[in-house]
Image (tube, rainbow, N blue to C red):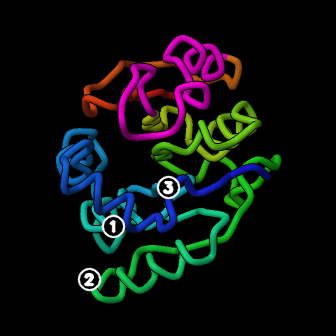
Amino acid sequence: MVQTDISSESKDQDEQLKVFRFTDPETLVSNLGIEDGNVVADFGCASGFFSLPIAKKIGEEGVVYALDILPQSLELIISQAKTAGLNNIIAKRVNLEKEGGSKLPDESCDWVIMKNMLFQNRDKLVILAEARRVLKVGGKALIIEWGMHNSAIGPDKNLRISEEALTEIIQKAGLKVLNKIPVSNFHYGFVVIK
């Protein structure tokens, strides 16, 4: 497993993103069409940048599976969820680069979220195939990655995935790109469907 944290503290990275409004999770979540009662898997959830706003959006009838390989990320999410009074987040330590790595049942999720995580992993196809496996028929995934342009922030350009390369992997995994969405000046995003 090559999944690594690109900062010394994933919480610091997520807070930095919020402060600079590179990606505003609340606005993005409200515009995606995630609904009350949805089941959402947050692949590579880090400190809960999307897990927490989604948990608020889907209400008590919904569930967010916050999935990461780093135990400290999961501990942080659990703590933040308790502080916010959210009881609908289930944090699990998983290896998403293994077949069946999420440990979720087939076709159990309405949405899968992936933010800045594919570039950190070698086997992107396995991760996207896992998203396809857990998505219900007609289920959707939001995939956000760093853009290919040079910038003073983010991973080295040689670690990033171009939109074209990601589109190819998405198709190989049996998913279809619905649309490209505006995310930030530093990222691109796709909504894909099973």
User: Rounded to the nearest whole Å, what is the CA distance between mark 2 and mark 3?
Assistant: 18 Å
User: Rounded to the nearest whole Å, what is the CA distance between mark 3 and mark 1?
Assistant: 10 Å
According to the image, label 3 marks what residue? 42
- Quadrant in which residue 161 is drawn: top right
Compared to residue 105, the image places residue 55 above or below, namely below
Mark 2, secondary structure of its residue: helix
Looking at the rendered structure, the kind of residue marked 2 is Ala
Q: Which residues make up the magenta segment?
A: 146-171
Residue 63 shows up from this direction: no
User: Rounded to the nearest whole Å, what is the CA distance between mark 2 and mark 1?
Assistant: 9 Å
According to the image, label 1 marks what residue? 52
Q: Is 153 or 2 nearer to us in this picture?
A: 153
Side of 127 where 190 appears, left or right:
left
Q: x, y percentage for residue 188? A: 37, 27
Compared to residue 187, the image places residue 169 above or below, namely above
According to the image, label 2 marks what residue? 84
Mark 1, secondary structure of its residue: helix
Residue at image x 58%, y 53%?
108
| Of pointers 3 and 1, the one earlier in the residue sequence | 3
Q: x, y percentage for residue 132? A: 64, 36
Q: x, y percentage for residue 26? A: 20, 53
Residue at image x 61%, y 63%?
68
Compared to residue 90, the image places residue 26 above or below, namely above
Q: x, y percentage for residue 63? A: 44, 66
Residue at image x 25%, y 26%?
182
Q: Is 104 or 165 nearer to us in this picture?
A: 165
Looking at the rendered structure, the kind of residue marked 1 is Leu
